[in-house]
Image (spheres, rainbow, N blue to C red):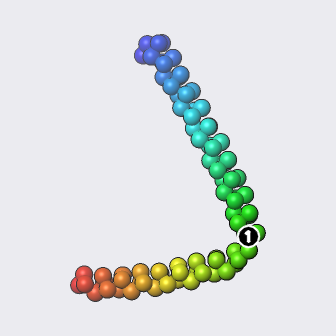
Amino acid sequence: MKESKLIEMQNKVGALTRVVQQLMNEMNNLKDLSIGTLEVVKKLPKYKKAVDELKAEMEEANKINKTSEKKLELNVE
């Protein structure tokens, strides 16, 4: 391979490395932001009640999905 081609490839790999490092830094920043936001939301009034309501909704949705899956299984045969 020509030396110029190798240098070009090396430059591209270096650029990609910098991009991936920047993405990793941004992911860490987003993680910190989301954790901070969650901690603030936990301090809001009625947080526990809202979480309990969401859990109840999820349980209801899971029941509906299980019923639908059973119906699908019966129709397949």
Q: Say above or below: 10 vs 40.
A: above
The residue at the point 66 percent across, 57 percent down is 34
Q: Is residue 22 left or right of residue 44?
A: left
Viewer-proximal residue, 5 or 17? 17
Residue placed under numbered mark 1 in the picture:
44
Looking at the rendered structure, the number of numbered marks drawn on it comes to 1
The residue at the point 57 percent across, 27 percent down is 14
Q: Position of residue 3 (x, y in %)?
A: 48, 12
Q: Position of residue 5 (x, y in %)?
A: 45, 16
Q: Quadrant of residue 15?
A: top right
Viewer-proximal residue, 43 or 8? 43
The residue at the point 48 percent across, 22 percent down is 9
**Figure quadrant of the C terminus:** bottom left
Q: In the orientation shown, which residue stands out farthest toward the top?
A: 3
Q: Residues within 10 Å of mark 1 (few under 14, many from 20)?
A: few
Q: Say above or below: 67 vs 7.
A: below
